[in-house]
Amino acid sequence: MKLSPLTELSDSGSVASSSASAGRRKVYKKRKQEYHQEKKRIAFELMQTLKDPTVVLIADWLKIRGTLRKWMRVFCVLKPGLFIVYKNQKTDKLGHWIGTVLLSTCELIERPSKKGGFCFKLYHAMDQSIWASRGPRGESFGAVTQPLPTSHLICRAPTEESGRCWMDGLELALKCNRLLLRTLNHQLTKEHSDLDDFANEEKDISDSLVTLENKSDLDDDTASELDEDVDKVIRETPYVCASPEVFGEFGGSEQVEEVAEENKSLLWALMKQVRPGMDLSKVVLPTFVLEPRSFLEKLADYYYHSDLLTAAIREDDPYKRVQLVLKFYLSGFYKKPKGLKKPYNPVLGEMFRCYWYNPETDSKTFYIAEQVSHHPPVSAFFVSNRKAGFNIAGTILAKSKFYGNSLSAILCGSAKITLLSRGESYLVTLPYAHCKGLLIGTLTFQLGGSVCITCDRTSYSAELEFKLRPFLGGTETINMVVGKIKLGKETLADISGRWDSAISLTDRETGETSLLWAPTGDVIQHRLQRFDVDLGHQNPFESQKLWMAVSEAIKESDQAKATEEKTKIEDDQRQRARELANMGEDYQPRMFELDSVSGQWLYKHADYRPWDSQNDVVQYEFNFAVKTQSHHRTPIVKTASLSSVQSPSFAIEASKEWSDEEESASEQSQEMEKSNLATLRLSSRTKKDGDKALQDAVTEIAKRLESIESKLDTLTRKSEERRVVLTDPFTVAVLLILSMFLILFASIHYA
């Protein structure tokens, strides 16, 4: 049968289309292979630079300035693209690494200094972090030193000559770092055949610099491969809207409750078991005084207005910024439970998670909490919204004291609010809750105690005092809070008002009074919507599912059923504790780890990198781990030592003045540097057969190396001359005779 010309044309067109599609698939497959090979090659070069002890531009002693403006002497090693800081010359041993500066993010500038020597500064132009997340040997935490700045590092060399040598070396290191940048059009070398084996052998070190994507299945040449999304599909915990909130009374009223007649006998029986001054953490409370939710969930009440922190991050004036942080802090107190109730004491290993959606920034504020200890009862929590620009970490030890007719619930510990793009951290404490009228009078709830909000970087602070109502006081003293905002020791503004209503701020310089915070109807209406994990997807140890039977019984006023279910949970906890004790083991928290230096519990998946709108896509939570999906997976940026930044008082080393012996490196280290530089120059010359851009860069590097070598020769000669003078036997004898003469003269003079 003869086909029509139109049919033949259609068949030929389909054949051409399929062949073109096959050609595109082959091109895509080839380019994807080159892409993965190029990533591995760059990681290989970086790891070789970090591991190879011969690739060293300069290694010498410098002084660096910490956050507290104290100088400390450290041993610095300069490699292409990396500036590594050690406590001493034992660079090959663990425990001596302080931090690694990524020179690719840095600018270099000479800095004037009143002190002797030569000063220079490495800094990020956009005030972002310059530090790598891990050390050369995969260290997660650096050596304990005074805290170091996040976005810059100020260094001081003993002489101008050695400082100029460091400047030339850093410029060279920056150029060497830029040589690592490539495109897919770069000609691949035959080194790629060995990269897969190297990546497997050096996995731990590769994690410290760059995280490689999982190898894609490149053998699948189906047409769907062209439409495949490059980004990996994320697994996210399913959330649903939280139940409607239940509020108590608003605005300047005491929180009171009348005890029902049938419960008074239970309360009197409880009073017989305790004595004044006793800690109530181990006392079993009757269920009628319990609020149907866990303490871990109650701690989440402070973050319904976390959008206020976004405004603080956008504010350039640090004085106004501390006001906005204070405003956020005060926004967590006005919500009162209906009636005078106490949340459940969390059991060991109990966890709670939720998030709030902020439509203004289209972001989620995730909250993760865990009961990390039962005796004493310690709760750890972490709040993160990297897109909005903040993290909050806290450790709370709950205590309670009985005073006869009253008791106090004391929240020991602190929380740290970190504004990521600002590099600022605000340390805050919490007031205690006071309940009186247990035996005589009406049960009344109040907040009391002094709290503070401090920022070490800006030196701004806020001090607040929550006042208890005096025995003979009037209604004007109910829920009073007073305080002040200070810069150092100078008071800038006074604060006064009621923590459950309006709070005003009076500027001392201008005398103007403005409204700092007030939970008006419009403010309450704009509380962020909270989302909880659906009960069907919750684990048995999550708060809402764990206490579900108790909460339902309390809501139905079935105190007997509530007590029975509560006893089951507590008995199960005691049984688990006995099993661990029999095995000689301690409970290991799932999501938090203890920092032995600061005593704080740190979230294992904490990410303190500022949000990168060009790279970061979305922040999500799965299996209690808060992560970020990004186009390119980069190392998590932390400070040089997480433990060292918890409090500025930890391990501050004394600053020492430069001595003549400290002003130059040892003869052995300088000879090693010269040989390393010569080796690096020789290897750079072998690459001159590349493209013209690389040839120009290599020529410039060779010139820089010659300049550095000449300066090192000069320093070596000077140190040798000084060493000869000090070690000459005749010189030593003369110095000893002179010292003895001075001692004899001083003794005769004072006699």
Image (tube, helix red, strand yellow):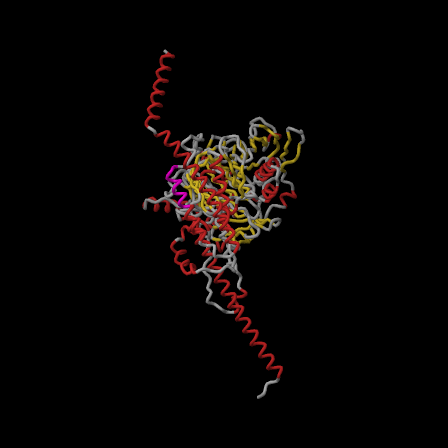
Range shown magenta:
666-676
Residue furthest to the bottom: 1
Number of on-image labels? 0
Q: Quadrant of the C terminus?
A: top left
Is 110 a magenta residue? no
Residue furthest to the top: 751
The main secondary structure of the magenta stretch is helix
Camera-nearest residue between 713 and 65: 713
The x and y percentages for residue 693 are 53, 54
The x and y percentages for residue 671 are 39, 41
In this orientation, does residue 318 appear? yes
Camera-nearest residue between 288 and 318: 318
Query: With 95 as the anchor, is 6 left or right in this view?
Result: right
Q: Is residue 221 above or below residue 68?
A: below
The x and y percentages for residue 450 are 53, 31
Camera-nearest residue between 504 and 423: 423
Residue shown at the point (41%, 43%) measured from the top left: 674
Q: Is residue 454 above or below residue 101?
A: above
Q: Quadrant of the N terminus?
A: bottom right
Q: Is residue 33 above or below residue 557?
A: below
Camera-nearest residue between 665 and 84: 665
The x and y percentages for residue 427 are 52, 37
In this orientation, does residue 265 appear? no
Residue shown at the point (61%, 28%) measured from the top left: 474
